[in-house]
Image (cartoon, rainbow, N blue to C red):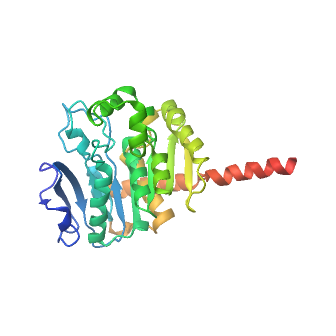
Amino acid sequence: MKNLVDKIVEIEISEIVSYEFPENELFGLKIFEDNVKYEFLLKKSTTSDKLICFGAKGGVERDKRELPDFPRFSWHNSFKESLIYPADPTFYINEEIKTGWYIGNEENWYLEKIAEIISKIKENFRIKNENILFYGTSVGGFSSLMMATLFKKSTALVGNPQIIVSNHFTKPYENIKKYCFNGLDEETIFKKYGHRLNVVELFKRENYVPHIIYLVNAQSKRDLYKQCLPFIGDLGKLPNFNDNDVEIIIYHDIDGHVARVSRKVAIPLIKLVLKRKIYNYNENVSNINNETLLFRYKEQQRIIDEYRSKKLIKLMDKINNIIMKVKNKL
């Protein structure tokens, strides 16, 4: 972490709410709880009452990347909001684990503990849940959906997320079963820890479905058939969505699973979602004097306009309309 930020704060969970954190700069936070090291990059904004939380990634090459790992930390200068980057302590359990999903171990669900810490951070920052956006793709999309479920009234923007961990590639999941759950059989794991491994199971436990904007690439067959379609099927079995929308945006991109997660596209997309759902995001272009920054701003605006022109399909509305048409023909 020292190679990323100049300031690192080490405190207890009980100190978070009243602690005087640095303002308007990225800094590190370390918390030790029950022999687990929780690590974050944070920015406390004094000019915005909004918060963006970025999810972790999977497929971490342990021999090439030092822990803690903070994907997209370099984006922090692109946002005026408060920011949180939570690292995944699951990687510390065993070096064979390259995708962690914040699973933790049998006794401790790391994602839930991190949610507890974030709850105290947002209280310190004076952030309301409805002003929190959880953003992530793939594994980060999974954690963002889980977090948005725990933080009622928040929003999740996700790209090609894992919904069902067991439907991911075999080896990463086998490592989770072996090192996090001590080799428990599949039936026992699902019965005791299903809400950690399947987004919809957490929906059921919490009796809550968050507002979700879900992008899935039709060219990524595993994401479409192993994650998205089962998710849609399970959503149809839920009694209600708590007046929230689940928006599924299907796109076509030859880059497959990693499509549309580049800085060029993701940052303006995040800003667009903030503008649509949370608040009006306006950059003061008159303050941009550097030609490179001005070009980047104009390119971001072009992408925002492109996405704005696309119809966002509200899944339940579409299904209800189809049902009504069928009934009218009978």
Query: In this picture, is 52 found above or below 284?
Result: above
Drawn side of residue 245 relative to residue 292, left or right = right
Residue at x-position 64% and y-position 52%: 316
Asked where in the image residue 295 lies, by quadrant, the reply is: bottom left
Residue 49, percent from left and from top: 35, 71
Decide if residue 290 is in sight here: no
Decide if residue 49 is in sight here: yes
Residue at x-position 78% and y-position 52%: 324
Q: Residue furthest right?
A: 330
Residue 151, percent from left and from top: 40, 61
Towards the viewer: 243 or 8: 243
Towards the viewer: 220 or 188: 188
Q: Residue furthest top?
A: 171
Residue at x-position 34% and y-position 42%: 101
Towards the viewer: 94 or 277: 94
Towards the viewer: 12 or 1: 12
Residue 160, percent from left and from top: 46, 41
Number of callouts: 0
Residue 209, percent from left and from top: 51, 56
Asked where in the image residue 67 lies, by quadrant, the reply is: top left
